[in-house]
Image (cartoon, rainbow, N blue to C red):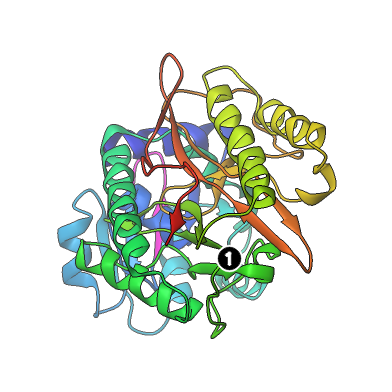
């Protein structure tokens, strides 16, 4: 797996006509080497693979990244990296333009020998868009953990408990089932707060007759899941049923559009048209979805600004339309979806039918 990833990275490096690439974004360091520590970086050339770290991680790095020569630094990460570049005669260095801090860029450049420079900005995240079988298995497991947490939380929710109690229960259940941590800050938004797409859980108490939207995810072996479900505490009104039906129809339509060859903008646009036709075009402002993996938000995107010209088998995207009515209510429904050879597979399998918690 790492052999293939390094091969693709080196092919990319040759296309850029650089002598070596500096990998400092933590998830990319993990992806290309297998090492899961921090305060480290990779130096990869067509012939060499170096992992520069400190004494806290040398043993771990040797175990997790056997294809890399582990270089211990004692007086500074950038000093040692620059020393390695000089020793190998690398002059033209590629760097992660979307990840390296400007301060780091300047200090690293000052340490390089004359005629050597960080002068090829690259975006390595693109190399992670299509997931391997092992990655998909990890994401599938993270989704299973999220589904199990939903089965538990609908037994826990009741009038009088706070949003934060709901978030804590979700996270505790996912931890007990093998999640390393929450995939992101858990969103629980009830009643009027449902109009906040990223309504982080508060001390607000849940009241009968309200929607409760829960957006959360697990992390398994470094890989994320993401799902949103909205339930009604108490009997749903006719208005709530109609609004929920609009979002569910759009969400299921969006899932049906996910297949190989379809552009990200097209999926987003068609779902957006469907919501607009129901009279809520102005109440759905965010993108339809995003990919996920080692990060919770990755490429490709399903949005008006997506640069994905064609979904490919092995890609994953979320499909998460919502309708938000400021000062009144709102809801969202979300699945993590795998693009397959012939269509798609929904990895988050919890029921999406309107659930009334009585």
Where disc 1 sits, the SS reads: loop
Q: Residues within 10 Å of mark 1 (few under 14, many from 20)?
A: some
Is any part of residue 96 visible from this angle? yes
State which quadrant residue 170 falls in. bottom left
Residue, x 72% and y 27% (percent of image)? 270
Q: Nearer the viewer, residue 49 or 122?
A: 122
- Residue 103 is situated, as x and y percent measured from the top left of the image, at 65, 76
State which region is magenta. Answer: 41-48
Picture residue at 20% right of the left edge, 57% below the top: 64
- Is 309 in front, or is 267? 267
Image point (33%, 50%), residue name? 147
**Residue 92 percent coordinates (x, y):** 58, 49
Does residue 10 appear to the left or right of 198 in the view shown?
left
Foreground of the two, 37 or 143: 143
Q: Which residue is mark 1?
A: 209
| Residue name at image x 36 percent, y 49 percent | 31
Q: Quadrant of the N terminus?
A: top left
Does the magenta run of residues contain 43? Answer: yes
Furthest-top residue in view?
Answer: 342
Is 15 positioned to the left or the right of 76 in the image? right
Q: Position of residue 324 (x, y in %)?
A: 73, 56
Q: Is residue 45 above or below residue 108?
A: above
Q: Which image quarter: residue 26? A: bottom left
Task: Work out whether 34 lies above or below 306.
Answer: below
Task: Give whichever of 130, 211 is nearer the camera.
Answer: 211
Q: Is residue 248 magenta?
A: no
């Amino acid at each position: 797996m790492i052999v293939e990833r390094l091969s693709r990275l080196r092919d990319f490096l040759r296309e850029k006509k650089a002598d070596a690439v500096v990998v400092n974004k933590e998830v990319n360091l993990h992806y290309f080497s297998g090492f899961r520590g921090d305060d480290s970086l990779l130096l990869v050339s067509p012939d060499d693979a170096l992992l520069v770290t400190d004494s806290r991680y040398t043993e771990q790095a040797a175990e997790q990244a056997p294809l890399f020569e582990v270089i211990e630094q004692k007086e500074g990460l950038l000093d040692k990296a620059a020393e390695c570049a000089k020793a190998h005669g690398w002059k033209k260095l590629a760097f992660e333009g979307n990840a390296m801090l400007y301060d780091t860029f300047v200090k690293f450049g000052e340490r390089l020998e004359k005629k050597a420079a960080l002068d090829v900005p690259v975006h390595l995240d693109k190399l992670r868009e299509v997931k391997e079988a092992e990655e998909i298995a990890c994401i599938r497991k993270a989704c299973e953990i999220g589904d199990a947490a939903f089965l538990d939380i609908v037994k826990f929710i009741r009038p009088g408990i706070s949003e934060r109690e709901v978030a804590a229960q979700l996270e505790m259940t996912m931890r007990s089932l093998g999640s390393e941590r929450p995939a992101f800050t858990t969103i629980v938004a009830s009643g009027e707060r449902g109009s906040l797409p990223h309504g982080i859980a508060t001390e607000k108490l849940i009241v009968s007759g309200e929607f409760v939207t829960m957006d959360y995810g697990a992390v398994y072996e470094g890989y994320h899941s993401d799902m949103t479900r909205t339930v009604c505490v108490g009997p749903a009104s006719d208005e709530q049923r109609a609004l929920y039906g609009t979002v569910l129809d759009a969400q299921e339509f969006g899932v049906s559009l996910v297949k190989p060859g379809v552009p990200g903008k097209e999926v987003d646009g068609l779902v957006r048209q469907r919501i607009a036709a129901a009279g809520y075009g102005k109440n759905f402002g965010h993108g339809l979805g995003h990919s996920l993996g080692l990060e919770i938000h990755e490429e490709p995107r399903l949005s008006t600004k997506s640069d994905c010209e064609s979904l490919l088998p092995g890609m994953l995207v979320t499909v998460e339309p919502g309708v938000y009515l400021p000062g009144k209510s709102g809801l969202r429904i979300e699945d993590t979806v795998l693009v397959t050879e012939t269509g798609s597979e929904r990895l988050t399998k919890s029921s999406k039918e309107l659930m009334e918690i009585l």
